[in-house]
Image (cartoon, rainbow, N blue to C red):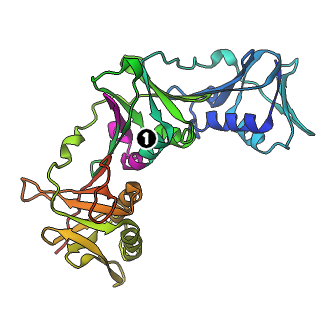
Amino acid sequence: MKFHVNRDVFSEAVSFVVKLLPQRNPQPILAGVLIEAGDQGLTLAAFDYEASARTTIEATVDEPGTILVHGRLLSDIASRLPNAPIQIAVDDDGGILLTCGSARFTLASMPVQEYPAIPEVTGESGLVPADEFATAIAQVAFAASRDDVTPVLTGVQLEVSGTRLSLVATDRYRVALREIPWDGGQAASDETTSALVPARTLQEVGKTFAHGGDISIAFSGSGDREIIAFTAANKTVTSLLIKGNFPPVRRLFPEQTEHHSVVNTAELAEAVRRVALVLDRSAPLRFTFGADGVSMDASGTEQARATETVDATLVGDEVTLGLNPQYLLESLGAVRSEFTRITFTSSDNANKLSPVLVTPQTSVDKGGEGTFKYLLQPNLLLR
């Protein structure tokens, strides 16, 4: 096997395929990157039984063949090579020789025959705008749980229905929901198709494909090997779906939303960051939504205390409640609008705190398009 390839193109391709690999893999063979040189150029792939990444790039192939080489080492080397074409060849002893300008590396080859087959996706697919999909992931994925004790909460639920794709995530204390357009083509159906995708994998997809035009999303497999594939340009990422039933959190969003406050997003976020400095970790921040604005009050250790008020418009009665400041800040970063509407929901249970609904607001008087919603459960305050 022998080929020549552009340094920048090769470095970017290797970096892409190794991103999804875990830092520590119990099976050394899965730390490898599979490189196939043929008539179509170079195909690079990585797979750890849960997620895979594959890309094809142009190269001059003198001798076709397939090699398996340690992925992160190859990525580190490729990113630091001089500005010159790369040549990779296999010597008589099976070693891999990499040459770039005056730099030369000899790398050990890994047994190709022991590497698992990369998943192929043949199911129905649809298209979403790459920029909107990346934005939707950023608005939702942070709300997924980071606790592996409940695996279904570590994922983002993707649901396709008609011409809409929705993304939903929750960690029990909050719920984030975003909807974007879905183009199912001739195979479009009103039947709902869902997939529970690991949040970490989906976040990498969002970063990688953010500027790729349209992304093709395909659902494939059955039983314990259901997978989803994301493809844009010459790159494909697949992910094994999380098994289990995602909680029916959509029903938690209220229909009546008259009792609310509208506040400038940036002003509220800056004030929350300042006042929360004196709080103990995980302690709630006291908010009072009144006719004169939103007042924040925090008491911390060593008699530290902070208060601040931000202008706001209130519709309805004054409300005092405690909110996790970090959770609120993440929602304010996700609304992506100049103003934010905070709606106070009602509950049939008088002994239970009702969640607040955070949505974008174009102006003080005009609501947003309604494709993003964030529900946050208040904390008990010590009176």
Task: Give how far across and how far down residue 374 sits, in percent.
Answer: 30, 52
In the picture, which quadrant includes the C terminus?
bottom left
Task: Give how far across and how far down residue 27 sits, in percent.
Answer: 59, 28
Residue 113 sits in which quadrant? top right
In the picture, which quadrant includes the N terminus?
top right
**Mark 1 surroundings within 10 Å by alpha-carbon count, few (fewer than 14), some (14 through 19), many (20 or more):** many
* 43 horizontally vs 250: left or right: right
Would residue 284 be seen by someone viewing this image from the given angle?
Answer: no
Task: Give how far across and how far down residue 216 sits, in percent.
Answer: 49, 27
The answer to whether 171 is drawn above or below residue 163 in the figure is below
User: Depth check: 60 or 91 in front?
Assistant: 60
| Label 1 sits on residue | 199
What residue span does the magenta drawing correspond to? 139-165
Which element is circle 1 on? helix
Residue 184 sits in which quadrant? top left
User: Depth check: 151 or 291 in front?
Assistant: 291
Residue 45 sits in which quadrant? top right
User: Depth check: 103 or 92 in front?
Assistant: 103
Residue at image coords 38%, 16%: 222
Going by the numbered disc 1, the residue's amino acid type is Ala
The answer to whether 3 is drawn above or below residue 166 in the figure is above
Q: Residue furthest bottom?
A: 303
Task: Give how far across and how far down residue 243 sits, in percent.
Answer: 34, 28
Residue at image coords 35%, 73%: 279
Residue at image coords 85%, 44%: 82
Is residue 164 magenta-colored? yes
Q: How many marks?
A: 1
User: Depth check: 41 or 72 in front?
Assistant: 41
The answer to whether 83 is drawn above or below residue 322 in the figure is above
Is residue 348 magenta-colored? no
Q: Residue furthest right?
A: 102
